[in-house]
Amino acid sequence: MAWIALLLAGLLEIAWALGLKYSEGFTRFWPSFGTVLAVALSFALMSVALKTVPFGTVYAVWTGIGAVGSVAIGILLFQESADPVRIGCLALIVTGIIGIKLASPGV
């Protein structure tokens, strides 16, 4: 359950980062509301994961999911660069997330 909560928290981190873009500096109500809601839910789910998964693991996985997802969204929605070096760096982050998960207690 903790790992599912952590995965969902990471996905919500992507959502709130995207919401920041669409909120236009918190000047648009619905994107701003969605961003704040996503932040709150992300933190709540991360706190669930922290009950059983080590702190460093939770934070590394949460930020890793957010970073990889945000870059992927940037490439897909905003035509940001998808050059091989960027993709290779993303692959390294994903590899690190998997490694941390496999090396964590309770796998």
Image: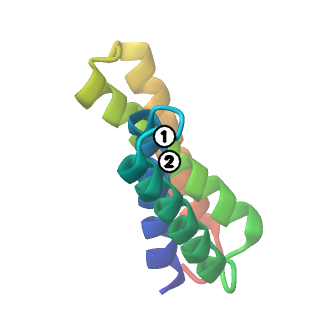
* x then y, percent, for residue 52: 67, 85
Tell me how the rendering is colored. Answer: rainbow
Residue closest to the eye, 7 or 97: 7
Task: Determine which residue is flagged by label 1.
Answer: 20
- Residue placed at 48% from the left, 40% from the top? 20
Identify the secondary structure beneath mark 2. helix
Q: Amino acid at mark 2?
A: Gly
- Residue placed at 65% from the left, 54% from the top? 60
Up the image or down, 54 lies above or below 97; here it is below
Task: Determine which residue is flagged by label 2.
Answer: 66
**What is the distance, in whole Å, between disc 1 and disc 2 at their CAs?**
13 Å
Q: Is residue 64 left or right of residue 79?
A: right
Q: Is residue 63 left or right of residue 10?
A: right
Identify the secondary structure beneath mark 1. helix
**Circle 1: is it few (<14), some (14-19), or many (20+) Cα within 10 Å?**
some
* x then y, percent, for residue 87: 38, 25
